[in-house]
Amino acid sequence: MQAPMKHALSSKTLGLAAALGLSFAVAGQAHAASCSYTVVNEWNTGFQGSITITNDGTTAVNGWTVGWQYTNNKITSSWNATLSGSNPYTATALDWNKVIQPGQSVSFGVQGDKNSTAAAEKPTITGAVCSTVTSSSVATTSSSSKSSVASSVPSSSSVASSAPSTSSSKSSVASSVVSSVVSSVASSSSSATCATTSQCNWYGTLYPSCVTTTSGWGYENGKSCIANTTCAAQPAPYGVVNGCAVSSSSVATTSSSSSTKTSSSVSTSKSSVASSVTTSASSSTTTSTSSSKGAVLGKFRVNADGNITKDGTVVPARCGNWFGLEGRHEPSNDATNPSGAPMELYMGNMWWVNGGAGSGRTIQQGMTELKAKGITMLRLPISPQTLDATDPQGKDPNLKNHQSVRQTNARQALEDFIKLAAQNNIQLFIDIHSCSNYVGWRAGRLDARPPYVDANRANYDFTRETYSCSATNNPSSVSHIQAYDETKWLANLKEVAGLSAKLGVDNILGIDIFNEPFDYTWADWKTLSEHAYQAINSVNPNMIVIVEGISGNANTQDGTPTTKDAVPFGDTATNPNWGENLYEAGANPLNIPKDQLLISPHTYGPSVFVQKQFVDQTQAGCAGLEGDDAGNAKCKIVINPTQLEKGWEEHFGYLRQLGYGILVGEFGGNMDWPLKTKQNVRNMWSHVTTNVDQQWQQAAGAYFKKKGINACYWSLNPESADTMGWYTTPWDPVSADDKWGQWGDFDTRKTSLLNALWGL
């Protein structure tokens, strides 16, 4: 969606202990363990399997290797184990999941091709560690899990689990080692001094230290960086700057001279355990009684019903978009920031309200009101520049919120919003909304360049033809390059994935990896999405990866807008919205575990764009017309739910039958359209006198509910010029343009729509 005008030491500690010369008794591999293979999901061409090793003995398993063989099936990807061979296959433990305590389990996952029409195979798992083997086509869970779907990552009862079990674990040797190791490292390095040009090993990835950014993350010299103060805020081995460990003050809560229960926010790229552990100066073995509800990091998954779960419990997806931090489009005649792109989170409290006194509204007030209306989840759009605390478009003098609520910088506003949402028990997913806060919604690809689709739009002041996200092949109009590419994008995804641990929150359910990638073919977008999953999962395996669809055409050659070709989307009578086309995803599925994947199409009615399925095709001179052409021809608009549903079903709805969870990332609109738009739009569509966009929204909501599809409303805040918001506003671009950024009460029509969708 466009913002205004679219306005826009974990269980890996055992390896660490060895490196530091610590030792303790662990048993070898030859133990009584049960090894099972479960077919978690399968579809016409492929499958997803989970292999679980459960220690049935009385001593710990230290290291394991298992093997199996298929007749026709072939593995295409795996996770949480080192896979070798090409049928037969061998899987070996990673450092963080090689130890299995008595009564506990570890699991790893595979995905592959069936190479036949038969059901997915269920091979026998063999290996020295296996005393008994089982195979099943029914997903199973550990006894402590609340979820009805087998996880393809370590179960909640395993040493390397993503979140502690709701029941007491039988032992936590690794937890006590964590405390002693961190305490030892901290005490031995309290006086270390590190250079600003060094690097920080943050969750297994080395990042350069920032030069000008004083805290948090930055983006300097074309790279993501971390301030030394932020590196030093984490215990070793991750808060390490150029080999220098952390200051003693940063781990003051980690070590203790007496038995103390502390909450550890230490995590690794392999295991995002953030459990409460009990440390003792007199004992190296303790018992953990922490509940998964008390974990610093929540474990989010998608169950068999397509619903989001947190630590095994379904989270209702009553969801909306709260935009602003991705960048606004300032008019070219703005007194302070002409043609700027400020990143600011709106709250209905602009500096000019009430004669400069402001409205008194706060972010917390908005959260309180939205929760009272049923909201449980928010989608939060950002741009790469949002992550840079030094970007001038995220700071004064370019901000317009009242001084009493004005942010320090966009990065700080992002972090503050996440923490405040956590305090309100509101779940979030972060949306990488564009390659640039200037380019905004017109991106369509990571390296977008002009000409953009609105280059010749009538009476439009925000074409952005001077900005590009491409380092090469730019037209002569470009004078500002904010180069972006896959490497920078993956670094941003990792950075966002690390925010849960950095901020000590458990409410970031996932990342919407890129908004409306309309300039890619499905094959290209599928590859990028799989790379995104690997990057995110390497930092935080508790997260869900949210993947949007493509469009009806794409750049299939050199990425320039002049070489677009059609891509399949089914019946051409219903054209897909940007981000809506997942027509090819069934036959060519993403190599991402279904329980870590949400399919997230976008779909809109006539207030955003008059597509041909909204136009009366029987009217003389209107067949095949859309957009301004249909408006100038005075074509009637007809909302036909039956026709719309056929299009939605082809574009994305069919994926529910294939077992995918679907969360529509954006739907909504201006129920008064063509009113509350600019004068030229009102003139063009003056012949439309019925509530056609409201009719479209009602049809969409009814379809989502019938299909068991969740959806996020665009938008909650009313600053979007083509959709308005759930909150009303006195702003009108014709009669009250000076009231932009002010909020009223909730739109009762939209409240009724959302209550019907949510079953409230």
Image: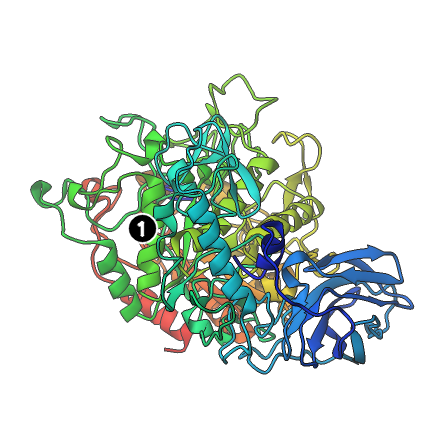
Q: How is the image coloured?
A: rainbow
Rendered view: 433 above or below 660 = above
Query: In the rendering, at what x and y percent does residue 242 appear?
Result: 51, 34
* Residue 426 visible to an observer of this rendering: yes
Farthest residue, direction top: 476
Q: Amino acid at mark 1?
A: Asp
* Residue 696 visible to an observer of this rendering: no
Query: In the rendering, at what x and y percent does residue 59 appear?
Result: 67, 76
Farthest residue, direction front: 282
Q: Identify the residue shown where x is 37% and y is 52%.
A: 723
Q: Is residue 396 left or right of residue 204?
A: left
Q: Identify the residue shown where x is 23% and y is 30%.
A: 397
Query: In the rendering, at what x and y percent does residue 252 appear?
Result: 35, 53
State the residue in front, 120 or 151: 151
Query: In the rendering, at what x and y percent does residue 305 appear?
Result: 58, 75
* Residue at mark 1: 416
State the residue in front, 147 or 750: 147
